[in-house]
Image (cartoon, helix red, strand yellow):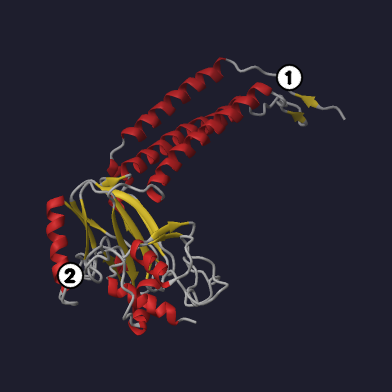
């Protein structure tokens, strides 16, 4: 059988003209995405860092992706026209076979690799600041998802704050989120940050509020029939904001301190005293195991099971922690004694399993710690 192979062709003037035109279109698309207003992304203006970095990364991906699309789509159209089958071609004609072009293969390997490496560096840098970086003088706050609302915990405020979450301007924040029932999600569009709220799991995000204002908090996981009430962006039956919608308020440092003190006083009415930070050595005498069991259910059960060490949720199971000779040392390497358990409850610990919040973050008094140790001691 005779094969009618097309004769080799060379890239002529038309190819370079098309390449120049595609280059101009690529530059236009890059400039467009880099200078496009925030409103084009259907998102509010950035109000926290690293929100600006996330937007810059998004613009970089849109600009580079658009430029790449222009060249790929443009060359497909150009080659489909320039090297189309001709009426004079034989019915069994075979097009030009191009292979083993080492220069071409070298460049189509180097350029995508360099792009992916650059994108990875930019992405990992932002991810590290959100997930792992430990900011100096950071405010540690917790948020719990419920059906169908959010609550917030602050150091030195007894109990949980509802309705609004307040944060000081320009102070780094470490936000730990989890859920009390089903899976929720904590999202503040103006901050460009979102974290899933999973029962038994603590997720952490780090950011710095930069612009005072009132920003809606949105749950982005369907969590039940009244899920829509957890979004301040979804109007209620009367067309106005949901009455149960909750907001994150960024205050100036002075206004935040006023709000914080007012919350301390308001929540102290429930316990007849402002919560006191645990300091020095905790006196474990007089610990009440029953009260400790209640505390464990509200403060600890999201991360620890009342089961063997291997029954891990976030941290290990704690049954027999002070009695089982096969139980390993505590997470900080110290022997499992009441005093060492109290030390971890008081000071917290960060290790391979994650972060155990300290007494201030968990709103635990010395008496609370004594009660928890008494309860753990009763688990044999």
The image position of residue 169, as x and y in percent, is 20, 49
Residue 126 vs 245, above or below: the answer is above
Q: Which residue is pictured at 18% across the width and 72% down the height?
A: 267
Q: Which residue is mark 2?
A: 274
> Disc 2 versus disc 1: distance between alpha carbons?
89 Å
Q: Quadrant of residue 375?
A: bottom left
Q: Is residue 44 visible?
A: no
Q: Is residue 38 visible?
A: yes
The image position of residue 135, as x and y in percent, is 32, 47
Local crowd at mark 2 within 10 Å, few (<14), some, or many (≥20)? some
Local crowd at mark 1 within 10 Å, few (<14), some, or many (≥20)? few
Indicate the quadrant containing the N terminus: top left, top right, bottom left or bottom right. top right
The image position of residue 287, as x and y in percent, is 33, 80
| Residue 379 placement, left or right of 12 | left
Where disc 1 sits, the SS reads loop
Q: How many marks?
A: 2
| Residue 352 placement, left or right of 208 | right
Q: Earlier in the sequence, mark 2 or mark 1?
A: 1
For the residues carrying marks 2 and 1, which lies nearer the camera in this image? Answer: 2
Q: Quadrant of residue 371?
A: bottom left
| Residue at the right extreme, as displayed | 1
Where disc 2 sits, the SS reads loop
The image position of residue 71, as x and y in percent, is 51, 30
From the viewer's side, name the closer residue of 282 and 118: 282
From the viewer's side, name the closer residue of 343 and 53: 343
Residue 240 vs 89, above or below: the answer is below
Kindly identify which numbered label has been placed on residue 7: 1
| Residue at the bottom extreme, as displayed | 290
Q: Which residue is pictured at 17% across the width and 70% down the height?
A: 274
Q: Which residue is pictured at 31% across the width and 73% down the height?
A: 283
| Residue 379 placement, left or right of 217 | right
């Amino acid at each position: 059988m005779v094969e009618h192979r097309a004769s080799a062709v060379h890239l002529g003037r038309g190819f370079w003209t098309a390449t120049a035109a595609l280059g101009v279109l690529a530059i236009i698309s890059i400039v467009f995405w880099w200078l496009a207003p925030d409103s084009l992304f259907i998102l509010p203006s950035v109000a926290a860092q690293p929100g600006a970095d996330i937007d810059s990364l998004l613009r970089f991906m849109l600009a580079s992706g658009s430029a790449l699309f222009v060249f790929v789509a443009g060359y497909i159209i150009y080659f489909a026209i320039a090297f189309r089958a001709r009426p004079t071609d034989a019915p069994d004609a075979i097009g030009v076979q191009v292979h083993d072009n080492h220069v071409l293969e070298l460049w189509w390997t180097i350029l995508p690799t360099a792009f992916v490496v650059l994108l990875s560096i930019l992405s990992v840098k932002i991810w590290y600041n959100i997930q792992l970086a430990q900011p100096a003088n950071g405010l540690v706050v917790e948020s719990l998802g419920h059906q169908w609302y959010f609550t917030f915990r602050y150091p030195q405020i007894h109990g949980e704050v509802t309705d609004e979450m307040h944060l000081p301007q320009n102070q780094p924040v470490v936000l730990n989120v989890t859920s009390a029932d089903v899976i929720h999600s904590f999202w503040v569009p103006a901050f460009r940050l979102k974290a899933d709220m999973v029962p038994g799991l603590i997720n952490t995000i780090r950011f710095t509020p930069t612009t005072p204002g009132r920003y809606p908090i949105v749950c982005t996981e369907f969590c039940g029939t009244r899920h829509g009430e957890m979004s301040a962006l979804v109007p209620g039956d009367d067309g106005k904001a949901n009455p149960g919608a909750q907001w994150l308020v960024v205050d100036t440092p002075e206004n935040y301190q006023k709000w914080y003190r007012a919350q301390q006083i308001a929540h102290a009415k429930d316990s007849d005293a402002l919560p006191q930070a645990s300091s020095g050595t905790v006196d474990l005498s007089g610990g009440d195991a029953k009260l400790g069991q209640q505390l464990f259910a509200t403060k600890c059960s999201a991360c620890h099971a009342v089961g063997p060490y291997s029954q891990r949720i976030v941290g290990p199971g704690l049954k027999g922690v002070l009695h089982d000779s096969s139980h390993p040392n505590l997470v900080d390497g110290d022997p499992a004694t009441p005093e060492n358990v109290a030390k971890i409850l008081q000071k917290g610990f960060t290790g391979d399993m994650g972060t155990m919040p300290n007494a201030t973050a968990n709103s635990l008094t010395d008496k609370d710690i004594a009660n928890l140790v008494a309860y753990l001691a009763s688990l044999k």
